[in-house]
Image: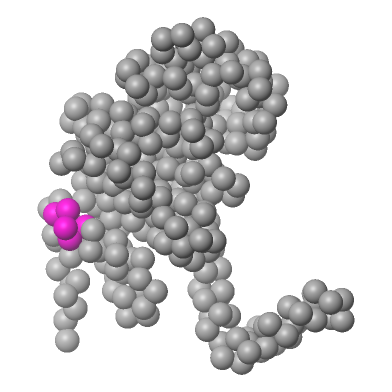
Amino acid sequence: MPSAYDDHAEAILSGDRATLARAITLVESKREDHRKQAHRLVQELLPHTGKAIRVGITGSPGVGKSTTIDALGSFLTAQGHKVAVLAVDPSSTRTGGSILGDKTRMAHLSADENAFIRPSPSSGTLGGVAAKTRETMLLCEAAGHDVILVETVGIGQSETTVAGMTDFFLVLMLPGAGDELQGIKKGVVELADMIAVNKADGDNIRRAQAAAAEYRAALHILKPASEQWSPPVITYSALTGDGLPAIWQTICAYRQSSEGSGALAKKRRDQQVTWMWSMLEERLFAKLRADPELKSRLPQLEQAVAAGRLSPMLAVEEIASTMGL
């Protein structure tokens, strides 16, 4: 019996938003029949993907990510772009919460016909959430969105995950670099393709400029991720829109540079392989969690390891043996 989703590909390619939303729900489903349908759909649409600019955006809570994405996205749609905003939310793996609240804070963009906003799945491992986000990104590209903004809430491993699925990684910072610099995570700065200091408006302009100068000094100490690109530091205001064109111009310059050198093609090839392994890992863990023998045995193994009666190595051996590995 043909699936109701068999005609999704054609509708998505025509830019049908409702079909795109249903297809993403299909991708996020944990049902085995849905998983197979989703894989067929993504495979069918794969030749129509890859043309968009993929931008990862991170920053600590309070930096103004939602306001920035709302302003930047609106700027881009006004320039004729179709923008998709996706989210990788590690908190959802612990609490079942969602970043959907950010959609309500993107007032202009959420009402824009040329924008599509989608929160992350509400459960599963961060790797699982990331895998679904990658597939969602491909669906949005097939639907004609030429700019994909992938947001992370800026906590822990999610930053590395988002940097690993995008072309350009934008790190947002606040004025007041003296204090900020002390708490800045070196790993995040090393991932950055650009640092943008927000809230450079009114009385904050000088503080923002001072912060930018300190971030530039910090970047000089670190080895850049690419020999062809030195991450710039700029100031901007999500509130007034000042500096947003400069952010986009920098992203476009990076795209042009990385395409010309072949770095973008290599990065995307590497990301595809990483995607494959992360999805395999997710499937293995799903099998582990679903195994009836292991479900009853795992709590006992955990208790034995925690109490020091069983070494972690032997516990892993038993689990692997039960799974036939």
Q: Which residue lies at the image location 66% right of the left edge and 18% below the top edge?
A: 178
Residue 172 visible within the image:
yes
Judged by its main secondary structure, the magenta piece is helix
**In which quarter of the view is residue 44 placed?**
bottom left
Q: In this view, does 270 lie above or below 260?
A: below
Residue 313 shown left or right of residue 48 in the figure: right
Q: Which residue lies at the image location 52% right of the left edge and 76% below the top edge?
A: 286
Q: Which colour scheme is used?
A: one colour
Which image quadrant: the N terminus?
bottom left
Question: Which percent across, then down, holds residue 35?
Answer: 35, 74
Span shown in magenta: 16-20
Q: In this view, does 163 lie above or below 240?
A: below
Question: Which percent across, then down, holds residue 153?
Answer: 49, 44
- State the count of labels: 0
Residue 131 shown left or right of residue 140 in the figure: right
Residue 220 shown left or right of residue 43 in the figure: right
Does 263 lie within the magenta span? no
Question: Which percent across, then down, holds residue 170?
Answer: 47, 32
Does 18 lie within the magenta span? yes
Residue 146 visible within the image:
no
**In which quarter of the view is residue 31 placed?**
bottom left
Q: Which residue lies at the image location 32% right of the left edge and 17% below the top edge?
A: 240
Q: In this view, does 124 lie above or below 36?
A: above
Which image quadrant: the C terminus?
bottom right
Question: Which percent across, then down, holds residue 291?
Answer: 56, 87
Camera-side residue: 91 or 9?
91
Camera-side residue: 303 or 85?
303
Residue 130 shown left or right of residue 249 in the figure: right
Camera-side residue: 14 or 156?
156
The residue most toward the bottom is 293
